[in-house]
Image (cartoon, grey):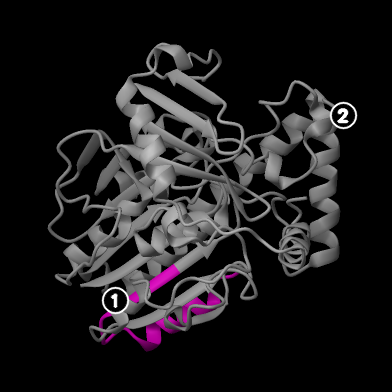
Amino acid sequence: MNVLVYVSDALRVDHLGCYGARFLNTRTIDGLAAGGVRFDQAISAAPWTAPSMTSMVTGLYPHHHGYLHWDAELDPTTETLFRAFGAHGYEVGTWVFDRTFLFRDLPEANVLGTSETLDGAIGWLRANREQPFLLFFHSWATHMPYFVQHAERKDWRAAKEEVIAGIQADSASALEATREAYRQAVERQSEELVASLLGELDSLGLRESTAIAFLSDHGESWGERFADKSKVAGVYHMHGATLHDEIVRVPLILAAPGLEAGVVTHQVRSVDLVPTLLELAGLPAGDMDGESLLSVDGDRPAVIAGTDRGALSALAVRQPPWKLILEVETGEEEAYQLETDPRERISRPADVPPELRALVFSELESAERRELTEEEEATVAKRLSDLGYL
């Protein structure tokens, strides 16, 4: 069985028709969900790309794999999705938003180029159609700023600064313009990029022998959590700074030969992706935080790691109907009863079930934590600035 993983960066669940969105055209993604399994409550392991994507391809939580910033080093003994499939005869090809960031230290990922167009991935598909393959495609089409290629650095930074300035000014018209650009980007992702890639699978006769996973690494916000909009200083404050559901609840769709279509309403996690794909391909899985999605019999507790300039800053446990967030340095807690307060407006830490608090402290004890040197902190800050996060 072949495997295609398509990650739409910063895609919110409430902007897909199959998750209830209205007035958007996401028919291709909706059709993929209708023919596969849609997971209604899928939770990312982190609120931004570097730790989240690393969790997605290792099956480990960020506080276990330790990849909390772009210049972190992943333990070379850590199993990855790419290495597991490559070791069993699969051709592996990966396309990312920028080769100097994502998976740059994972040679087994075989990063072949940018995902700003489909040309490389489609050419690779045609060349490898006769052998089992793993194609991993990470698209920034839904990442702010929209409709400006990351490679066009001057235009990209100017567009990003324009969006941030609109949020800081608390301008209703600027916010609506940004959200409309986002809606258009979501439609382009679905009806141009995903549609073209799936169409190529069809034309090559590969659709019926390919498992397809569509998901996001995190969601997006536009300053809603900040009473003082001037504090929205960069992309970090749109995703990365908080662990609320608009950021950590993500779309997850799985379609594969022989997999019965349906909707799973129980909570699952992005760390469950690796063991799922390995099981679908009949390959062994080692020790991971994730579990296969082929058999879900209840809500799985989801652990979410927040970071700040390369350090672990917060840990959350989401176990319906509760979410508990712990600030690592101060010990301050936030807790939300998601059934009665789905927008997470009223914090009730005194009412949180004690087993959630026990779990979050247990996870904190298991965390890989290392103090950064001043030089490392400066490097982290520069890399984040290069991406507009600071």
Q: Earlier in the sequence, mark 1 or mark 2?
A: 1
- Is residue 25 in sight in this rendering? yes
On the image, numbered disc 2 is attached to which residue?
A: 169
Per the model, the C-alpha gap separating discs 1 and 2 is 48 Å
Q: Is residue 344 above or below residue 259?
A: above
Name the side, left or right, on which 221 lies relative to 269: right
Is residue 86 a member of the stretch shown in magenta? Answer: no
On the image, numbered disc 1 is attached to which residue?
A: 84
Q: Which residue is drawn at 44% across and 61% down?
A: 65
Mark carried by residue 136: none
Residue at disc 1, secondary structure: helix
Amino acid on which disc 1 is placed = Ala
Which segment is the magenta one? 117-136
Name the side, left or right, on which 295 lies relative to 199: left
Q: Nearer the viewer, mark 1 or mark 2?
A: 1
- Is residue 43 in sight in this rendering? no
Q: Position of residue 149 (x, y in %)?
A: 71, 63
Is residue 118 a member of the stretch shown in magenta? Answer: yes
Is 320 in front, or is 289?
A: 289
